[in-house]
Amino acid sequence: MADNTEYSIIIPVYNGEKTLHELYSRIIGVFSGISEKIEFVLVDDCSHDGSWNVMKDLRSQDERVKIR
């Protein structure tokens, strides 16, 4: 399968449990008029909250979300 990604959005995540869903929604809103061929790379930066669980939740909802 060819990779059709046009944009990679790399987001360092540090204690972003309460803001990740909103950030994701806003980025989707912006890119909806530009391209659907995007990927999100969420990189946990040693968070001490539930960021990792939110990242896993976003990945389960959207195959374009990658987590590290």
Image: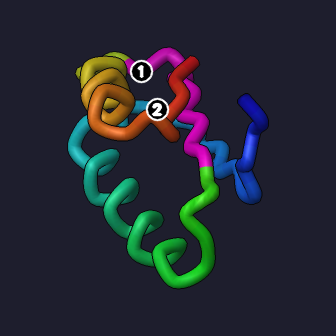
Image quadrant where one finds the C terminus: top right
Label placed on residue 14: 2
Quadrant of the rendered structure where residue 7 is?
bottom right
Q: Amino acid at mark 1?
A: Ser
With 20 as the anchor, is 43 left or right in this view? Answer: right
Cα distance, mark 1 to mark 2?
Answer: 5 Å
- Label 2's element? loop
Check the image and name the residue furthest to the bottom. Answer: 33
Residue 10: say if magenta. Answer: no
Q: Residue at x 72, y 49 (%)?
A: 5
In depth, the one of 9 and 52 nearer the eye is 9
Bin the neighbour count of mark 1 within 10 Å (Cα to Cα): few under 14, some 14-19, many 20 and up.
Answer: few
Is the Cβ of the residue at disc 1 closer than 8 Å to that at disc 2? Answer: yes
Label placed on residue 57: none
Bin the neighbour count of mark 2 within 10 Å (Cα to Cα): few under 14, some 14-19, many 20 and up.
Answer: some
Q: Which residues are magenta?
A: 39-47
Prevailing SS of the magenta stretch: strand
- Label 1's element? loop
In the displayed structure, 32 sits above or below 1; it is below
In the displayed structure, 21 sits above or below 48; it is below
Q: Which residue is mark 1?
A: 47
Q: How many marks?
A: 2
Quadrant of the rendered structure where residue 16 is?
top left
Give residue 26's position: percent from left, percent from top.
38, 69
In the displayed structure, 27 sits above or below 34; it is above
Give residue 44's position: percent from left, percent from top.
51, 23
Image quadrant where one finds the N terminus: top right
In depth, the one of 48 and 31 nearer the eye is 31
Q: Residue at x 60, y 36 (%)?
A: 41
Q: Amino acid at mark 2?
A: Tyr
